[in-house]
Amino acid sequence: MNLNIAREVATLRRLSTRELHAKYAEVFGDEARTTNNRVWLLRRIAWRLQALAEVDLSEHARQRAAELVNDADIRLSPPRLTTASPAPPQPKSAPANAVRQRLPRPGTILIRVYKGETLHVKVLEHGVSFDGTIYTSLSAVAKAITGSHCSGNLFFRLNGQGGGQ
């Protein structure tokens, strides 16, 4: 098949989407999977026309490609993501809850002055107690106090930084 590909592509660009579907079926011998993606149709048809117009691979190139395919270690699933360095092992005595690790020991009373009022929060085995209510985290207590979300550790100044007043 000897075609002037540039001229064929210019002709394709003037065709309607319906006419491109017909050309696709003519070139590929099958219906197009897309309905209105004109750019995709143009590219696929142009690729196919170019493939048909170009000289086929030599027999030596075909044999070499077949050898490479037979020798290839074909991966059936994507590789697992690896980190640059493995995470340090957790001590067996550490609690499973990561938030629990950031809280002071149970029984600790946190004191914070907020808008002229002194607040007392007691750390429990499973949560924190403030004003007669048990909360799951310091952030929940900070939200109850301020009315907006903020870091409990930051609000109670447990990480060495100041909290907002």
Image (cartoon, rainbow, N blue to C red):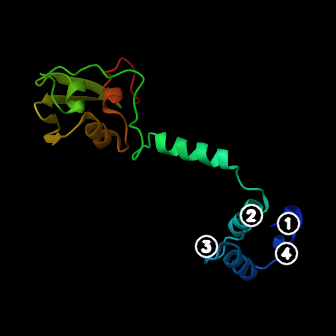
Q: Residue 59 — which label?
A: none
Query: Label 4 sits on what residue type?
Result: Arg
Which quadrant is the C terminus positioned in? top left
Q: Residue at x 15, y 40 (%)?
A: 134
What residue sits right under mark 1 in the picture? 3
Residue 41, compared with residue 56, is above or below; it is below
Q: Residue 127: x, y in percent?
A: 16, 36
Q: Of the residues under marks 3 and 2, which one precedes in the sequence?
A: 3
Circle 4 packing at 10 Å, graded few (<14), some (14-19), many (20+), is few
What residue sits right under mark 2 in the picture? 52
Q: CA distance from mark 2 to mark 1?
A: 9 Å
Residue 55, compared with residue 48, is above or below; it is above
Dot 2 and dot 1 residues touching (CB under 8 Å): yes
Q: Residue at x 36, y 32 (%)?
A: 115
Circle 1 packing at 10 Å, graded few (<14), some (14-19), many (20+), is few
Query: Label 1 sits on what residue type?
Result: Leu
- Quadrant position of residue 101: top left
Q: Is residue 49 left or right of residue 156?
A: right
Q: Residue at x 19, y 22 (%)?
A: 104
Q: Of the residues under marks 4 and 2, which one precedes in the sequence?
A: 4
Q: CA distance from mark 1 to mark 3?
A: 26 Å
Q: CA distance from mark 1 to mark 4?
A: 18 Å
Q: Of the residues under marks 1 and 4, which one precedes in the sequence?
A: 1
What residue sits right under mark 3 in the picture? 34
